[in-house]
Image (cartoon, helix red, strand yellow):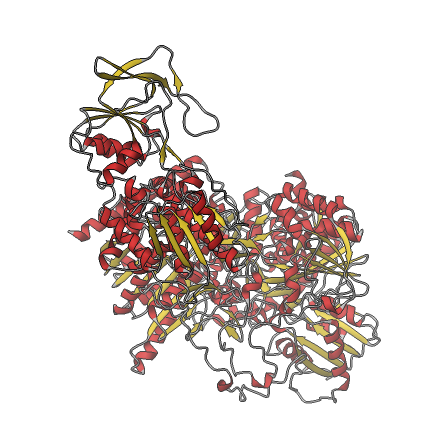
Amino acid sequence: MLEIRFHGRGGQGALTAARILASAFWKEKKYVLVLPEFKSERRSAPILVGLRVDENPIILRSAIYAPDYLIILDASLIRFKQARVLEGFKRESGLIILNAVQDLKYPIGLAGCRAGIADVDFITQKYGLGQKALPAVGTAMLGVFAKITNLLNLESIIEATEESDELPKKGNNIKAVKESFERAKMIEFPASDKLTETEIPPAGIIFQDFKELPGSVISLSGTAKNLTGAWRKIRPYYQNKTSPCQNACPLGNDIPYWLSLLKQGKNRQAWEKLMEKNPFPAVTGRVCRAFCEKSCNRNEFDESVSIRNLEKFLGDEASARGWHPPVLEKKFKPFNIAVVGSGPAGLSCAYQLARKNFRVIVFEQFPVLGGQLRFGIPEFRLPKDVLEKEINNIIYLGVKVCKGIFVDQKFFETIKRYYDAVFFAAGLQKSRKLNIEGEENPDVLYGLDFLKNINFGNKAISSTFLGEKVVIIGGGNTAIDAARTAKRFGSEVSIFYRRTKIEMPAIKEDVILAEKEGIEIRELLSPVRIFSKSGQNFLECQRNQPGKSAESSRNNPLPIEGSNFLEQFDNLIVAVGEEAENSFFVESEDWKVFLGGDIKTKAGTVPAAIGSGREAAEKIEKILLGEPPLETKDPQIVKFSDLNPVYFNKNQKREPASRSEAKRCFSCGVCDFCGNCWKFCPHMAVSEKQGELKINYDYCKGCGICAQECPRSAISQKLEE
Amino acid sequence: MEKILEKFRKVMHANEAAAWGAVRSKVQVISAYPITPQTTVAEKLADFVAKGYLKAVYKHTESEASAAALIMAASRVGARAFTATSSQGLWLMAEQIYSAGLRRLPLVLVNVNRTLGPSWNILASHEDSLALRDIPWLQFYAADAQEVFDSIIIGYKIAEQIYSPVMVNLDGFYLSHASEAIEISSQDSVDNFLPGYKPLYPVDFEKPLVYEPSIGDDYLTEFRYILTENLEKKAKEAAKKAHFEFQEIFGRKYEAIETYKMEKAKIAIIALGSVAGTIKSAIENLDGVGLIRIRMFKPFPKEELMESLRGVETIAVIDRDMQKIVWREIRGAFYAEQKPKLLSFPAGLGGRDVSPRRVLEIIERTKKDPVRAEFDPEPIWIDLKETNGGGNNFDPAKHPAVQISASKENILKEIPGEEYISAGEFSCQGCGMMIASRFILKGLGKRTFELRPACCGSVVNGRFPNCASLYPLQNVCFEEAAAEASGARAGFDALEIEDVNVLAFAGDGGTYDIGLQALSGAAERNDDIIFVCYDNEAYMNTGVQRSSSTPFGAWSSTTPDLKSQPKKDIMAIMAAHKIPYAATASIAYPEDLLEKIRKAKEIKGFKFILVFSSCPPGWKFSTEKTIEVARLAVETRIWPLYEIFNGEDYKASEMPKKRIVEQYLKIQGRFSHLKEEDIVSIQKNTDKNWLKLEKLFKLFQE
């Protein structure tokens, strides 16, 4: 008589499989008896089912105590003493049929045993049998049994499977049986003790001494010793992911983190978190193009969170309350670092290094700090006192400043010699030209120079500095700033842009403001030549039509032949980008020279400059301290479809942006302690201690509710090993 | 269809064999109530009826008493009727089946033997049917699945000949869930053996009869005499004849007792049921040891036993109960005869395995035991650990109460952090009921005494000696949660203990169906208790059988062709009782649930809270969707959240934005077979119900 014992979890199909195997043997003229040995076990709890097979009628009906074959549906059961998997198994003569991967890591107690194995979890999942958390492997295991034991034909199993009236998805089960048969391999576990891991003892209180039993059946002491974590197939774990706003932010601003603090009313902490990556929140809160808001998942729900306004709110609150960023590391670091240029990139780099207690000196060619922030952006967009306060915060950290020093090639070589590292971010100071006929006309001005003159309060500029009719060429921030500044001189201003309005790289809100202020924006126009005739200036323009471009999301305009026309102007302001004034600098880690700002990024945006400063500071820190560079992983970006939006209410932006607006933030991918995981865990496996949520893997059964009900995709799941 | 009628052989469990027995007996009315482990008999029959294997009226009742009553009347009007039950279920039927014997209704009832509770055990013992030894029925005990099938057919043959009911017993799990190859005889051959049923006194509208009117002492004795004659002499004759005829037709031989190696036996083991096979294999090679298996226990086959036991010196009776009932019967039979050594071995209780080793141990003990001439020797408990009598050594100090720990310190201030249920409980992954239970206890706090009837909650809470509930909880019978809660309150009142919440926590079976009578009673008395029903819309504990809470269109294991009746409106029933507080709640909105529990705690009188508790295995959705399903139920207005004060004032709870019911239905496997028109009709009914509620809400506002 053969004795076979199935070990599985409730829901894996052990009983059904035993019945199918019995039917298959019976088809081959054997007598069979299936003996389930379970009580009221629930889904996923360990269960066992016996099967006797004999040539003669079977009269023995007691349980199976010394099985010849073990069919183990779930290898993780072996370690659990209460699952009784190896109990009485005939180790020497017997054979195990095991659902496991080929390179099984823990053959736990199987030393010296022979086993037929196949990754039946994989096979059944492929055919959609059972649930992800609990694949229904029972029937497919019979394929492995047939192949390895050779006790019966695969056809008998397939026929018995077909005839089963308990089995759903018969077709797929049969496919799985066949595939398991194909993939089954025989392995022998070495007879080494090293492979034998400790067993997990039986759960709960066991009365060793029955003399102590109470007089009637009363339960005691809870079930804490019953480690239901053994039921788990899929493990949930807290994992913060990258929000699309943070991913889109050129300076890598930890937006959901500081918003989450702001939500809780912890404004100071929120500001400090914000300041970790951005020392200029009040500035970027005014002048950033807010890529974050464009990528905000809330756009797919109602409208984006006013991230930039919230940044401004925190920045302004900090300066109103006189908050200063703390120095992070007490220990002084004996390195001198030179920063060339006090624009957003240079100051960002100086700030990061000073916070880490490096000695930093900033060289600035002008007598004032701020670079582009100061002279490239008009007062009405960025009041000078706002800028001043944030710059002061940086200086406050102990940054030394050398103003009015232009770093030419010679001086640069000197700096290289005397400093441990150099960060070069002198910016792009030279306006790009149109390179068309007649550009040398004195009434043609350049955007950046124009703004610089005004911002520096150049005395040559009077209210009659500009003529009546001003045409601006370009679509970036400089173009809009120049146009709005020109408008303030009382001129009639139009912007000529070669693409369409929506494609303008300038901040959308500023474009709208410009139009509100009466500035005309004319789309799809390219300048061809400039000339003067009878004391009047003319710009010849060509009309474009939107072209298609495969590489870029923006259209490449196509000129329309013969569409040229003339436009009279008094002043023409060219704002089509800037370039560097000199090019003697080369980035080299060996010389410890790093580049940043527009020179490096060419992005022409404040956040990109700030980001480049921080990145360089990180590199400098690592190199100087001899630490390995930070590993960059591909960010896992949270999509709207990853969220559980039922926990969010639809509501429009709140003005002015403050805590209530912050509460609109989904906190994509970032745990904000909403407590849903704790609230909805049916198995008391989530707890909070000292402000930290924890999953207790001793009890977590792996149902997945926590991950499903996490509104913000801050819980991930993986298969248990 | 043709093939179904032919003889065939197949590997099946004894529950299926029982269902086939009913099919071949062409039973015309079937009733069933989900009691484990007979439930697969009912499920198989539901399936066979749905598939057309059997033309019968199938009724799923709300309690065991009704299951028995239903087939009794069916039998009275002339239909061959059948039911199956088990342990608690049999006892719930006790009054009915006693009366069935008196009424001489030739029913066949399959009883799956298992232990009585609470404590729930659900495994094999014979105490359920043996303790009902004296009801006016015949009792058979089968040893394998083939015998189960055959005994049902033989049962009807005998029953319909002598007009007395027959109980066919089979061991829980050892037979009910064990599978083996058996032969299902052809329909023709069974028809040949078992002609149609004619009632003893048919219902006739021309010559009307009144059945079982009341009776005085002038006649009762005579009727009782007639009945005993029938149950003894006539029954034995009929059984003999039926067994003989059965063998003629089917070739399988049965007698009142089965003997094995009794010819030269000095020691005889006597047992009932499935353990016989194990005993045979254990004594196969032992000289002088034989086995008698009593197949027909009632009427007791005294003559056959005496005959077989001639020359036997020692008899070892295996009693699968604690009262040595079989031993007593045998002792009674021997009273006037020779007096061999007669020992009782209580064994195999609550599913404890009787292995060949234990059988040999019994034989050894039998040999060693001094000759016991006394009339009533102590039973010899086999495989018994020493308990040192009566729990006198139990020291509660050695088992200190578990400290209730806060799993949460300060995230959600509005929800208490204390957990009154220990992790490590035994619920299925993603169990909705556990979430309901957690929040109810959070709302009530530790001074709560809970009465919990048979339901998922009573099983997943844990097994002796470890249970998850960290507050006092009494497990009670299925139908009496409310009555026991009333009793607990009465007790506390009598003792003048005031600051205690008395909670009844029942599933929908224990509320809508079998628990309804006690619930209605307690509600009408306005007893100061909180009755919480965690509604998972079917009998989940026993394998997803329909309840009156199962919604229209849902699959269940006893409605394979989907339920065609609407869900019972229990809230309207409770409102009709004019109780101070009734409310619906959902696990997807725990704050709302908590608020309602707190309200219930403050209100004096009877409180009823109905909590929607989604069930992943029963409703066929994957475990992580428990909350999503519950939330969709509320959003679609399938499960509106509201309160009813004093049975009249309806108040809506905060409701989310409305969605269409399809979104709720399509994520659950139990609704996957719904057709377009079914969904339309569900939407219509949901809208209608919501409209009605909205009108009631308005009424309250005015």
Q: Quadrant of the C terminus of chain A?
A: bottom right
Q: Is residue A260 above or below residue A586?
A: below
Where residue B309 appears, as percent x and y from the top left, is: 76, 76
Numbered-mark total: 0
Closest to the observer: A271 or B653?
A: A271
Closest to the observer: A382 or B281?
A: A382
> Do we see residue B352 in this rendering?
yes
Q: Residue at x 30, y 62 (%)?
A: B596
Closest to the observer: A89 or A230?
A: A230
> Do we see residue B94 in this rendering?
no
Q: Is residue B373 above or below residue A62?
A: below
Where residue A546 appears, as percent x and y from the top left, is: 38, 21
User: Which residue is situated farthest in the top direction here?
Assistant: A562
Q: Is residue B188 above or below residue A556?
A: below
Q: Quadrant of the N terminus of chain A?
A: bottom right
Where residue B556 appears, as percent x and y from the top left, is: 50, 50
Quadrant of residue B606 within the rendered picture: bottom left
Compared across the picture, whether B154 is left or right of A292 comes to right
Where residue A384 appears, as percent x and y from the top left, is: 24, 47
Closest to the observer: B324 or B357?
A: B357
